[in-house]
Image (spheres, rainbow, N blue to C red):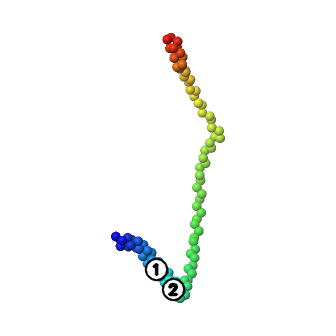
Amino acid sequence: MAYQRLLSFMLPFLVLTFSSMISNTMVSEARHLLESTPDLPKVPELPKPEIPKLPELPKPEVPKLPELPRELPKPEIPKIPELPKPEVPNKGTKIREALKSN
């Protein structure tokens, strides 16, 4: 049991160590290649191609939009008929009348 815990604990450290060793070797080899290469041959300059001028396109005619009136007419709001209010008897008066009759 302790052996498995040791492996699971040490494995990430081993991977990190080996990856740092490999990357260091690659960097030093790349630096060595850059320093040891002789002067590279010069690439001849290519002539710039001439781009022909495009013919001018006619501008399309856009139809004018109809003008909207500045002030809009106010809509007429119909009147709502008033409903008669029902009379609700007061509870206090019913109780008083009942007490008086007793």
Q: Give me the residue at 57% from left, 71% from top.
A: 51
73 or 19, which is in the foreground?
19
**Tag 2 secondary structure:** helix
24 over 38 or under it: above or below: above
55 or 16, which is in the foreground?
16
Spot occupied by residue 83 in the image (x, y as percentages of width and height): 54, 22
**What separation in Å lies between label 2 and label 1 (alpha carbons)?**
17 Å
33 over 94 or under it: above or below: below
Spot occupied by residue 40 in the image (x, y as percentages of width and height): 54, 86
99 or 16, which is in the foreground?
99
Q: Residues within 10 Å of mark 1 (few under 14, many from 20)?
A: few
- Residue 72 horizontal side relative to residue 96, left or right: right
Amino acid type at image mark 2: His
Q: Give me the residue at 56% from left, 26% from top.
A: 80
Spot occupied by residue 19 in the image (x, y as percentages of width and height): 45, 77
In the rendered image, which residue does mark 1 sit on? Answer: 21
- Residue 26 in view, yes or no: no
Query: Which corner quadrant of the image does residue 45 belong to?
Result: bottom right
Disc nearest the viewer among 2 and 1: 1
In the rendered image, which residue does mark 2 sit on? Answer: 32
Q: Quadrant of the N terminus?
A: bottom left
100 over 42 or under it: above or below: above
